[in-house]
Amino acid sequence: MNRWNFYTSKELKPAGWLRRQLTIQAEGLSGNLHKIWPDIRDSAWIGGSREGWERVPYWLDGFIPLAYLLEREDLIADAKKYMDAIVAAQEADGWICPCKKEKRARYDTWAVQLICKTLKVYYDCSGDARIPDVLYRVLKNYYDLLKSGEIKLFGWAKFRWFETFISLNFLYETYREDWIKDLARILKTQGYDYTSAVEKWKTPRHVWRRNTHIVNLAMMLKSEAVSHDLLGEAYTDQAETLREILDRYNGTAFEGFTGDEVLSGLDPTRGTECCAVVEQMYSYEEMFAHTGENKWAERLEVLGFNALPATLSEDMWTHQYVQQVNQVACQKTMLMAPWSTNGPYAHTFGLEPNFGCCTANFNQGWPKFALSAFLNKDDTILNAVMLPSVLTDKDVTIRLETDYPFRNQMHYSIDAKKEFVFQIRVPAFATNLRVNGEPADAKDLSFAIGSGKTEIDVVFETAPYLKKRPNDLYALQMGSLLFSVPVAYEKQMREYTRRGVERKFPYCDYQLLPKTPWNYAFAADRFEITCNGPGEVPFSQEHPPVTIKANMQQIAWGLKVPYRSIARKTPKSRVPINEAQEIELCPYGCARLRMTEMPALWKSSESQ
């Protein structure tokens, strides 16, 4: 398969609202985690005594591209400090993880797979000439140990075997040695086959299992796309079949899946783990690059513009472990939490509101999304996602000025010293497409660009519509943006220290208590759009970049028994309890408290 290639952070830079979003991330938890969190600051990966498994590689996987995209010399120096320590600790036989030789057989080598992925990210960003050889020795050692039977895949490594292919594909392209293909076969043979678990996805049992674990499933979607070439297998688009089943039985309005650790059905008050959001985005990024199929880029947009910002606080100092589509409060629940396997603070905002995996892993979301804006193949450059960016590719500079997805207007300034083909992926939902003022078909655009300067203006329209959801509910969507009734909230701050980990402002814990009504239903299908453009905080609840006014009525929705802060799965009654009023809905990603899936009263026989 002739795949698209990603640009590196040396060639592609964020601009406009995207640069502001990445800057907020760098000034928040991502850019400071190594100063405040013992599992990163004092990790065994750099000679300390704290966690020596997934957390440092997870964090670096996002922190490194963030530092280089923003050209922050202080953050680049911090990334180099960590990578230098990791490389220096590599053993003579190639082993690189902080684990004594006699304990390797009991060490879950998911960390090997993950650090290899991180090493490749570092090489792409820094060009550090040491890294290909470091990777070669790590993976050759991995191969020798697996081939000899000294170690085998178990635990997380067994269920995430395909993650190794991110670095393995790079290694084969670089060295072309047969053992690399043999390692690929061993990994698939010892790895878990998710097609054997499909029936378990249809009837979620709310019991902790790796084959229904939401993060594993989000990662799994890309398994065939990233592995089939090296395995010498035909590509069958297996992911589409598996995704359709997951969506049918566990889907959300933002096109992810419920998974408060494990698959959780079609209740819009069940949670979706933060790690799953960024991993599903990464899967779609890789799947689009490997297949060129527009559906993956379109689904990537929906996740990136909705679920990603929604699970992070506006200043990105805190995050949720799980987000809810209908989220009317973020406060501690009863000891018997309403999640499958998570604790009572899982949907509050904090440093580590449940397990610390998301504290480390959420960092990759925005930087890798930014690196998905432009791709290349042969003599063609593709704008895959319309994110404001500046691309410098040898003899070509392309500057994209846009507020997309908040406004559907794109201006491309191209300065070229060679001829090339420029393509723009036009979303399938675009209507009334115009290019330089002239009508055009709503398909991918292609331009033969010559030497000199070229200006291209692309404009299209999107219309709000009510998307049918399970349980006779509806969600308002326009283009890639999902819209919610925003609920004003009071923020309660909690500072404390537990198990040697300090939570203090601004990385303490926050509970959000509702101050305005949330028990709404759609009263009409007439909508009024107002575009304000993104501000200094692009996903602000108080100053959203675009809003839609809708006629709404309150209903007796009710709370889920026995909880005091969780809405019912479906309303107790759909009969209106007041007159219709005009409510301004904001993008889902702007609303930390929100109602998203709601009845449409004129479609409900109970309300007649």
Image (spheres, grey):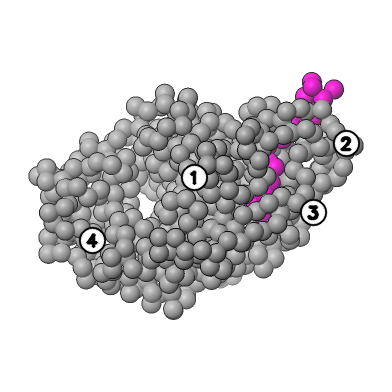
Residue at 76 percent of width and 56 percent of height? 531
Alpha carbon of mark 4 to alpha carbon of mark 3: how far?
Answer: 54 Å
Mark 1 crowd level (few <14, some 14–19, many ≥20, 10 Å Cα): many
**Among the two numbered marks 3 and 2 on one chain, the one whose residue lies closer to the N terminus:** 3
Q: Which residue is mark 3?
A: 530
Q: Which quadrant of the structure image shows residue 171?
A: bottom left
- Is residue 400 at least partly visible in the picture? no
**Among the two numbered marks 1 and 4 on one chain, the one whose residue lies closer to the N terminus:** 4
Mark 2 crowd level (few <14, some 14–19, many ≥20, 10 Å Cα): few
Alpha carbon of mark 2 to alpha carbon of mark 1: how far?
Answer: 37 Å
Q: State the residue lying farthest toward the top.
A: 605
Q: Amino acid at mark 2?
A: Asn
Q: Is residue 274 or residue 7 the one in the foreground?
A: 274
> In the rendering, which numbered label is found on residue 343?
1
Label pair 1/3, CB-CB below 8 angstroms: no
Nearer to us of marks 2 and 1 is 1
Q: Is residue 252 or residue 213 the one in the foreground?
A: 213
Q: Amino acid at mark 4?
A: Pro
Whether residue 515 sits left or right of residue 118 in the image: it is: right
Q: Amino acid at mark 3?
A: Thr
Q: Is residue 354 or residue 403 the one in the foreground?
A: 354
Vertical placement of residue 133 versus 228, above or below = below
Whether residue 479 sits left or right of residue 143 in the image: it is: right
Which percent across, then down, holds residue 530? Answer: 79, 54
**Among the two numbered marks 2 and 4 on one chain, the one whose residue lies closer to the N terminus:** 4
Label pair 2/4, CB-CB below 8 angstroms: no
Q: Which residue is mark 4?
A: 98
**Among the two numbered marks 1 and 3 on one chain, the one whose residue lies closer to the N terminus:** 1
Q: Which residue is mark 2?
A: 578
Is 594 colored magenta in this rendering?
yes
**Among the two numbered marks 2 and 1 on one chain, the one whose residue lies closer to the N terminus:** 1
Q: State the residue lying farthest toward the right.
A: 579
